Amino acid sequence: MTVVVLLGDGIGPEVAREARRALETLAPDLELEPHLFGGQAIRDTGDPLPPETLAACLAAEGVLKAPIGDPEFDAADVRPEQGMLRLRAELDVYANLRPAQSEGIDILIVRELVGGLYFGERGVREDGTVYDTMEYHPNQVERIARRGFELARTRSGKLTSVDKANVLDTSRLWRRVVDEIAGGYQDVRVEHMLVDNAAMQLVSHPGQFDVLVTENMFGDILSDLAAAVTGGLGLAPSASLSDGGPGIFEPVHGSAPDIAGRGMANPTAMLRSTALLLELGLGRGDEARRLEAAVAAALVEAPTADLGGRASTAEFGDAVLKELS
């Protein structure tokens, strides 16, 4: 089995190194294949997603992606984030799963990932007006809603659908389709919540939520908020899944160029994303659980600076490998 490893930018190579070490220990039979992606790919080839990288991702069993982004390209015509959006679209990883857990809180945000505002028509009119368009087809809403219902069925049986139906036509479509799908899931309790209220409730009373399903931009914002409520972005993993092809597994946080190369980065989110790769991408639940347990132990034994500790990125990785040995 082949896993493509996209090393990313900033702290990406540092946290990716710890994920590779863990995979080499847990699953030495895996073929780990590094490829250019993001800012470094732009520097080397002019393209954040070179054709060779895309072909390798399409042929792999899973893609383990480190964070991307570099201030050098923030205002450029070609940016690392463009490669990320193209990769998601090419692999059709429409279901982005973002768990957020801490004491008394166990939330799973199911975010639609290949539609909406980030993929709609955009441009500049002659008068200087700039526009971005949010669009959704009923089929796009149906498949992510169905994924949310299926996941809720395996958990507590509660699904919260988040929209802005009091303002947006796309959200009224979203709510209508979710209600239609709900008829086939009588064992799942469904509630609708406006996105501004959902944000407030995540901060004030997060324990009320189990599975949230929402569109692309709302999911982007709410999942970061849920991560902050449950310990910070440094702990938050994600899995982006299709209906059969390879998934993309990556931390929620960014590339943190301000601490790149200093050995300070917390690799927890990358390692937890690796556990999701093992479980959801490769069907290796036992190895995934071993890695999750090892990361939990390392958080106690060797916390990094962002968690009040003194361990370096590599020392945290060493603590994980010690637990796995």
Image (cartoon, grey):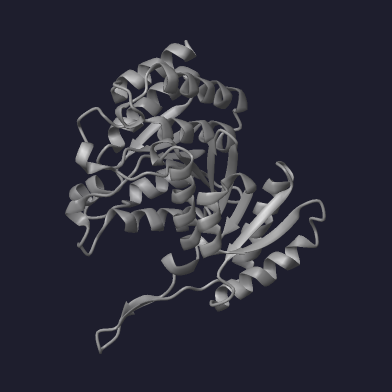
**Residue at image coords 52%, 38%:** 61
Left or right of 194: which side holds 248? left
Left or right of 149: which side holds 77? left
Expressed as whole percent of the image width and height from the top left, the position of residue 224 reads 44, 49
Expressed as whole percent of the image width and height from the top left, the position of residue 301 reads 41, 16
Asked whether residue 190 is in view, the answer is yes
Q: Nearer the viewer, residue 234 or 237?
A: 234
Residue at the outermost front position: 204
Left or right of 199: which side holds 304? left
Q: Nearer the viewer, residue 227 or 177?
A: 227
Expressed as whole percent of the image width and height from the top left, the position of residue 106 reads 60, 39
**Residue at image coords 52%, 26%:** 292
**Residue at image coords 65%, 69%:** 175
Q: Nearer the viewer, residue 296 or 202?
A: 202
Vertical side of 323 occupied by 272: above or below: below
Q: Splitting the image into 4 quarters, where does residue 46 fall?
A: bottom left
Count of numbered circles on the image = 0
